[in-house]
Amino acid sequence: MNKKLYTSLLLLVLSMSWTGCERVETEPRDWIKEDLVWDEQDKNATLAIFFLNDIYNYIPTGFNRIGGDFLDAGAGDALPSRTNRPVEYYTNGIISVLNNPDPYWGNSYAGIRRVNIFLANIDKVPATPASIVTWKAEARFIRAYLYFELLKRYGGVPLIADKVFTIEDNLALPRNTFEECVNYIVSECDAIKGNLTPEPVSDNNWGKIPRGAAIALKARLLLYAASPLFNGGGVSTNANLKTLNGYATYDATRWQKALDANNELINLNYYALQASYNNIFTVKKNTEIILSKQGSNNTSIESLNAPIGYGSPAASQGLTSPTQNLVDAFPMNNGLEISNPLSGYLPQNPYKDRDPRLALTVFFNGQTWLRRSVETFEGGKDKPGGNIVQTRTGYYLRKFMADFSNNTTYTNQSHNFALFRYAEIILNAAEALNELDKTEDAVKRVIEVRKRAGIKAGTDNRYGIKANITKDELRILIQNERRIELAFEEHRFWDLRRWKIGETALSGAVMGMKITTQANGTFNYSPVQISNMVFTKRLYYMPLPYDETLKNPSLIQNEGW
């Protein structure tokens, strides 16, 4: 390579604040021609690594991702504070083949193509053999992850292996079966896990994809594959779609495969629950986060989602309004549901003695923030009425933020979206154990999560889980535990589908809390309906993008679209 050109390109790379141990998003893509990227004289592989770094950009981040809103606002756990937002299409029936705010088809296949280009060319670069092995494993993990993103949306999709297509190739590829896609992703995870960065991950390697991520992806995938929607329970009446949308028949051993995969990660004896739920998401390096989408430190979560009434220098847009439906899902700190007469729940003091995770997930009236109480009562500073964007439900999003209770403004924080964390693995294992009729073993796993959350043990040391709980009862409890522990981490939307309970969980009233002041200075709390959700069976699978079905007549569209 021309030395002057190389030096200029290197300076441009460095000016974009990229380091070898952190994957920071950079634009524009494709700014270097490929004949320069795969330079046989570039012994440090500087531009090739930059190409790999760009591939990381195709991994989705969950923060305000759907037109400025969280995906959970399409799953009944929040509403966008702005009305008529794209994410509401999932709950109001507007979604269509032309109007899907989260298709991810084009992004995934663009990323898969970039991976294949990387794999086809990286051996030309004179880097060390060990480095090339690791880089290939990272790229293949991203490709497997992108296939999973497609699979959970559509069912089986075309698998293209390592091929880099040209315009002369036949691009009219049919969809592979669901089983073929599962087997491919599992085989990729197994093949690469030994070549990824092993745990413990050093500071120099922090931000790279670790071995545990490949195991975690396989564990999540196999849990989905064992779940009711995919494990012989598909809703399609079209015979051609049955094997595309899942397995044709139920097989209980799929739950064992899911359990084995999650136990594989647990048995690494490296990952663990953090002592406190509060700082999981703002401490960049901890043993609970298996893999996160990396970014620079910032205040974006606070400025987009915190209560609106604080003003400069802590102004926020308050874009996310958690629902009363979600708030009611949090038990009391004794672990009992608020509907249980023995729980101690007080409707006119609704946030007293609740599961500590509630105050770390949503802002509610009276909570301390930036040295004053949050005011979401009617006419309060954070719900003043009028035309400005503000909470629609009486709540704002609190999760992912540092503790600014005693601050006067925000400071830059680590806001790396958790793609996999250990609490999910524990709950995955609990779900699989319960479905394998090992209910008390499953209870022990749930207790791990509840204990860390701050739920009280109780005299029986069961953390609010009743003695002799049945398999069906524990299934419901585990589903709720995932809802509150993993809130706003892009699980609920897909969990409701794989559990095949969309017709009940995503139909009906979306509730908020109307809070008014009384003459004696106390508050009156009245649940109110804000909107209504509608769910039909076709929503279990997303529609293949219309332009893709036009370009490729071999693609079979999902039923109902």
Image (cartoon, rainbow, N blue to C red):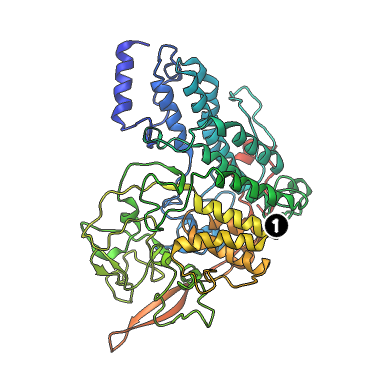
* Front in this rendered view, residue 518 or 484: 484
Q: How many marks?
A: 1
Q: Is residue 404 visible?
A: yes
Residue 39 placement (x, y as % from top left):
43, 14
Q: Disc 1 marks which residue? A: 436
Spot occupied by residue 172 in the image (x, y as percentages of width and height): 67, 32
173 up-or-down from 350: above or below: above
Q: Residue at x 56, y 56 (%)?
A: 427
The quadrant the N terminus occupies is top left
Residue under the point 29% across and 76% down: 379
Tell me: 122 left or right of 280: right
Q: Amino acid at mark 1?
A: Leu
Q: Which residue does the image show at 55% across and 27% down from the upper left?
A: 116
In the rendered image, the vertical position of residue 217 relative to residue 47, given as above or below: below
Residue 88 coordinates in the image, percent (x, y): 50, 60
> Can residue 88 be seen?
no
Q: Secondary structure at mark 1?
A: loop
Question: Left or right: where does residue 249 sit relative to residue 258?
Answer: right
Which of 199 and 221 lies nearest the eye of the viewer?
199
- Badge 1 crowding class, 10 Å Cα cut-off, few under 14, some 14 to 19, many 20 or more, is some
**Where does residue 218 sit, x and y in percent of width and height?**
60, 42
Q: Residue at x 35, y 58 (%)?
A: 305
